[in-house]
Image (cartoon, rainbow, N blue to C red):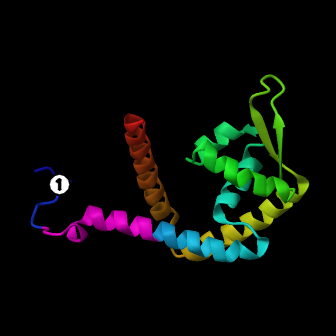
Amino acid sequence: MNKNQVTTEHHFPWDHPRFRSWIAVARACQLMQQTVTREIAHLDIKPPHLDILINLYRFDGISQQELARKLLVGRSNMSMLLPHLEKRGLILRRGDEKDKRVLRLSLTPEGRTLTEAAMEIHTALIERLLDDESIDDCLVVTRSMERLIGLLLREEGELA
């Protein structure tokens, strides 16, 4: 048995360290989403909208398809979320100059202002919650989660 294997003396999955780790990550993610939802509610946006706005802030002119890929959502999900942001005057959708089938997305000035306010709230929340964590510990978690993301994306690719 190698050092990473756990003996089968654990009778229930919740006794297994890897299972407990998985559940802890899932619960932390869910609670973080609930907290972010509460913290940005006065801006009248939800976390899926915030994810879109932040990505448009970072990648101005990204295509709708590229954005869906970055956010790990289907194009139909994207098609449901974008009209709300567009109606509020936060984003613009326009055809690509070279390929009219491609829609390019950008923030409006109002969208940029709202995104900056939301990012300030989000960043303050992260700082408040992780203030006692060392940078080294944060980097360990980052590496672990990025590795897990890579594995899950490969699994998904194999299933597709």
Residue under the point 17% across and 54% down: 5
Q: Nearer the viewer, residue 14 or 78?
A: 78
Residue under the point 37% across and 41% down: 155
- 4 with respect to 32 (left or right): left
**Residue that protrudes farthest toward the right in the picture:** 109
Residue 122 visible in the current orientation: yes
Q: Label 1: state its secondary structure.
A: loop
> Residue 126 in the image: x percent, y percent?
61, 70
Q: What range of the chain is rendered magenta?
A: 10-27
Q: Is residue 76 magenta?
A: no
Q: Nearer the viewer, residue 13 or 101?
A: 101
Which residue is under mark 1? 5
**Residue that protrudes farthest toward the top in the picture:** 98
> Residue 54 in the image: x percent, y percent?
71, 54
Q: Is residue 128 above or below residue 23?
A: below
Residue 61 visible in the current orientation: no
